[in-house]
Image (cartoon, rainbow, N blue to C red):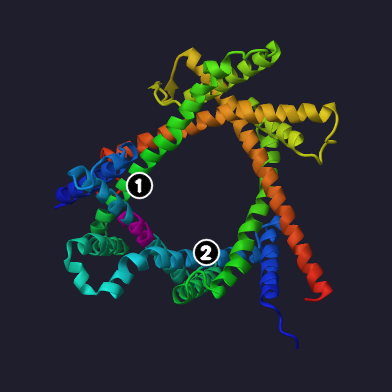
Amino acid sequence: MPELPLDFIEMIIAAFITVMILSYVIGDNVLFRIATYLFIGIASGFAGAIAWENIVKPTLVQPLIDGGLSKLFTPEGALTFLIPWMLALFMLFKLSPRLSRFGGFPVALLVGVGAAVVVGGSITGTLVPQSMAAAGTLSPATALPTAGEPLSIWLERLISALLMILATISVLIYFRFSAQRDLTGGARRSKIAEVFAYLGQIFIAVTFGVMYAGALMATIAVLAQRFQFLHDVVTRIVGGA
Amino acid sequence: MKIGTYLLWAAMAVGTGIIVLLGYFVQIDQIPADSLLGSIFELRLLIMGWAVLLAAVALGIGLFNMFLVHWTKVSGQDPGWKYSAILIVAFVLTLVLGLALGPDSPVVLFLFNSIQLPVEASLMALLAITLALAGFRLVAQRRDLISLVFVGTALLVLIGSGPGVLSPEGLFFSFFAGLRNWLVQVVAAGGARGILLGVALGSIVTGLRVLLAVDRPYGE
C-alpha cells in the first residue's frame, strides 16, 4: 500500500473540517459543534504553549537554569527575576476564592499599565492624528482654489471637505459626551444639538453601511476560496494523490 | 487591613500607570540615563515587562479555569459533556505537544494547519451568509430612515464595487463607481473619523478614571 504524503492527509482533514463548519448553513448540528469545540481546544492549547515559550519560560525559568539561585541576591536579579516571580505567584492566588484578595496586587499593576497604554495610545494614535487630519481638511492649502483650477472642481472639493467636517462633528455630537438629564433619565439638549445628533446618526448609518458592504465582499471572497479548496481536494482525490 | 491593601493596590495602579503614561509624552532620549528621571524611565520598561508576564500568567489562569469548567461537565455528565470531552482532549494534546516540542514544531504546526486554520477561514466564510441574512432581516423588520440609509448605502457600494453585477464599461457603471468612491472617501470617511474620535475620547476618559483611582477594577 503506497504511503500517503503528510500534506495530503493535512488537506483531507482540513477539507472535512471545512465541510463540518459550513454545515452550519443548514442549522446548528453535531458536526459544527464538534469542529468548534475542537477549534477552541486547539487554539487554547496553542495560545498556552506560545505564552509559555515566548514569555513565561524566558522570564521566570530560563534565568534560573542559566544563573542559578545566586542570581536572586543581586539588585538586578531582584528587579528582573525575584519581583516577576512574586507577582506571578500572587497572581496565582486568584485561583483560590479564599486567597484571591491577595491576587489584587498584580492585577492592580496590570490594570494601571493597561489604562496608561490605552490613554497614551488613544491620544498619540487616534486623537491627535485624526484631529490634525480633520483640521487639515479645511486648511487654506486644500480648501482654496489652485491656479488654473476649474471652478466646478474646486467647488466639488470644497463641498466634499465641508461635508466631511459636518459628518465628523455631527457624529461627535451624537455621542452625547455632556448633556443634562431630563425627568425620564434621557439626555436634554438644545434643538440644534438634537438636529445635529440626528444627522450624526445618519452619517453613522452610512459609515456602517460602507463597512458592511466591505465585510460582505471580503467574506464572499473567503467563501469562494473555501469552495475552491474543496474543489481542489476532490480533484486531487479523483485524480489520485 | 482592608483599607491598607486597597490603598496599596490603588497606589500600585496609579504609580505604574503614570510612569508608563509619561513615557508617551516625554522625549526619553533627551534625559541623562544616570539621573533620577532617567532611572524612572528605565523602570518604565521593566514595569511593561512585568505587565506582559502578568498577562501571560492571567492567560494561564484563564486556560486552567476553562479546563476545570469542562472537566466538571464531563465528570458530572452534564448536557453536552461529549463536546467538553473533545475540547479537553484537543486542549491537553496541543498544550502537551506545544510544551514538549515547541509551538513551531512540525507536529503542532500540522494541528494548526489542518484544524485551526480551516476552522478560522470557514467561520469567516460562514460570515458571508450570516451577514447577508442579517441584512435581509433588517430590511424586513425595521423600516425606519436609519435602516434604509444603512441598507441603501451598502447596496450602492456593492453595485459600485462589483464588476459582476454591471458591465464594467458605460455611463451606468461609471456613475455607480463614482458614487461609491464619493460615499467611501467623503461621507463614510467623515463619519468614521467621528466614530474613531468618539471611541478615543471614551477610552481616554475610562483610562483616566482608572489612573485617578476613581474606578478600581482590581478588587475591593
When the figure is inspected, residue B97 is found, relative to residue A99, above or below; the finding is below
The residue depicted at 49 percent of the width and 22 percent of the height is: A135
- Say left or right for A6 vs B19: right
Crowd band around label 1 with a 10 angstrom C-alpha radius: few (<14), some (14–19), many (20+): many
- Given residues B159 and B218, the one toward you in this image is B159
Q: Position of residue A149 (x, y in %)?
A: 67, 14
The residue depicted at 24 percent of the width and 57 percent of the height is: A101
N-terminal-most mark, 1 or 2: 2
Circle 2: residue type? Ala
The magenta span reads B50-58
Q: Which residue is mark 1?
A: A114
Q: Position of residue A189 (x, y in %)?
A: 44, 17
Quadrant for residue A74, please give it. Answer: bottom left
Q: Which residue is mark 2?
A: A43
Callout 2: SS: helix
Q: Position of residue B31 (x, y in %)?
A: 25, 41
Name the subunit of mark 2.
A
